[in-house]
Amino acid sequence: MLTQAHSEALFERAKKVLPGGVNSPVRAYRSVGGTPPFLVRGEGSHVWDEDGNEYVDFVGSWGPLILGHSHPAVLEAVGQAMQHGLSFGAPTAIEVDVAELIVSMVPNIDMVRMVNSGTEAVMSALRVARGVTGRDKIIKFEGCYHGHSDAMLVKAGSGALTGGAPDSKGVPSAVAADTLIAQYNDLNSVRELLEANPGQVAAIIVEPIAANMGVVPPEPGFLEGLRALCDAHGALLIFDEVITGFRLARGGAQEYFGVRADLVTFGKIIGGGMPVGAYAGKREIMEQVAPTGPIYQAGTLSGNPVAMAAGLTQLQILNAHPEIYTEIEHKAQHMADAMRQAAAASQVALQVNQCGALLCPYFTSEPVRCFADTQRSDLEKFRTYFWGMQDHHMYIAPSQYEATFVNASHTEEDIEAFCQAAAAVINAL
Ligand code: PMP
């Protein structure tokens, strides 16, 4: 066990003034037990905690840091922007630069509206879908997480799953009633809902790779099938690309899978580590948003110049270096293969799902292709795996239902260290 005295003392203080000691539930390590390391510093692929422990970081702030921590160009841009003031609440040139770059990188979009989080992006995109279609119902998938707006806290993944309470108190039943639940990778479940609610479904929202119940990739034809069902029933297709955006490819899942969405939501990478989200679509749809259209949505700090500076710089680097995408995918493949080999050698029941630079081990002998399959993973084994990895200085998400994030800053040594640690931990299971 690593020493954690300073983190433990801080966690005790934190629990007195922050619910659960944290500002976002998964950080509290509820599903693995124990104390979360309080982090003080990150550089490239490594982070340090309050007790001086150094880790290779495979969380990357839950996805945003695709270039690693403290990237010099990003820090430089933020420092420059800060010199001119922190916020104006007025139009600035950098918002135009960011929007133009996003529109040039992402297929099928003409316009973008910046917000401050993934939750806000999804909440706003749902309002747009409802406003444009004049319909109220939304189809989402069990185990997908789309932020914590009322409509989306129904059969949600990520922290809502980890906490053992898939649905939240405080969500009005009238709101939840308009959220219809389908099964991921099961087009029939979607078709049945559309047929049972004719002319009432405004949108189908999906994580193109489900990355909040571990990692569940779409099977061939699934996303294409959703597109066809939306077209047949007059519903909009929303790709929630808060995780997959700028991670799978410059153009995100639309480019990677070759399927067109009507609205796309972003977060995480788009802000380079600062609080940014966005939603985007074709001009006819986006001009329905205020002030040009009747669908209201606003934000005091939206398009904040310091946040835009971080996001713009990170996106410019990704745009100029598409080879990053093949590199991070290869690293993730290598890690997944190493884990599978270790499991085979030591006869541990293990499935490793990997797609792009996202991967997740499930401790089960059956393939994992939908929410029900994820529930078969042995959580006790996951806990042992988690703490074993921590002992090897590997910082991974403290939950079965989160992805392992690979990024451009991971060196060959980092990846080898992960593979060796995982092999040792799996062997000992
Ligand atoms: N959508 C998806 C797919 C997510 O993974 C998340 C957060 N992990 C969100 C939406 C919500 O984003 P935020 O936490 O920035 O509100």
Image: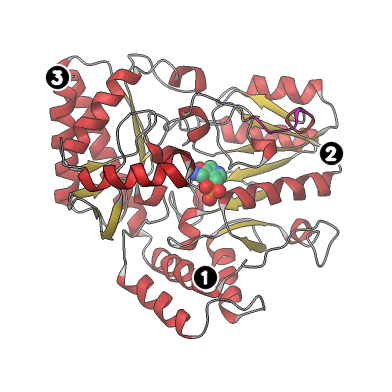
Whole-percent x and y of residue 63? 41, 50
Q: How many marks?
A: 3
The answer to the question of whether label 1 and label 3 lie on touching residues, with beta carbons closer than 8 A, is no
In the picture of the structure, the residue carrying the numbered disc 1 is: 308
In the picture of the structure, the residue carrying the numbered disc 3 is: 345
Amino acid on which disc 2 is placed: Arg
Left-right relation of 295 to 20: right
Q: Nearer the viewer, mark 1 or mark 3?
A: 1
The answer to the question of whether label 2 and label 3 lie on touching residues, with beta carbons closer than 8 A, is no
Region in magenta: 169-173
Was residue 171 drawn as part of the magenta stretch in this picture? yes
Whole-percent x and y of residue 21? 42, 43
Q: Which quadrant of the view contains residue 424?
A: top left
Q: Residue at x 14, y 50 (%)?
A: 413
- Which numbered disc flags the more N-terminal residue, 1 or 3? 1
- Which numbered disc flags the more N-terminal residue, 2 or 3? 2
Q: Nearer the viewer, mark 2 or mark 3?
A: 2
Amino acid on which disc 3 is placed: Ala
Instruction: Report the coloring of the rendering.
Output: secondary structure
Q: If the image is split into quadrants, where does the N terminus sit?
A: top left
Q: Which mark is residue 51?
A: none
Asked whether residue 70 is in view, the answer is yes
Q: Nearer the viewer, mark 1 or mark 2?
A: 1
| Frontmost residue, 59 versus 102 | 59
Q: CA distance from mark 1 to mark 2?
A: 34 Å
| Frontmost residue, 424 versus 239 | 424
Q: Residue at x 35, y 51 (%)?
A: 60
Element assignment for label 3 = helix
Element assignment for label 1 = helix
Q: If the image is split into quadrants, where does the C terminus sit?
A: top left
The answer to the question of whether label 1 and label 2 lie on touching residues, with beta carbons closer than 8 A, is no
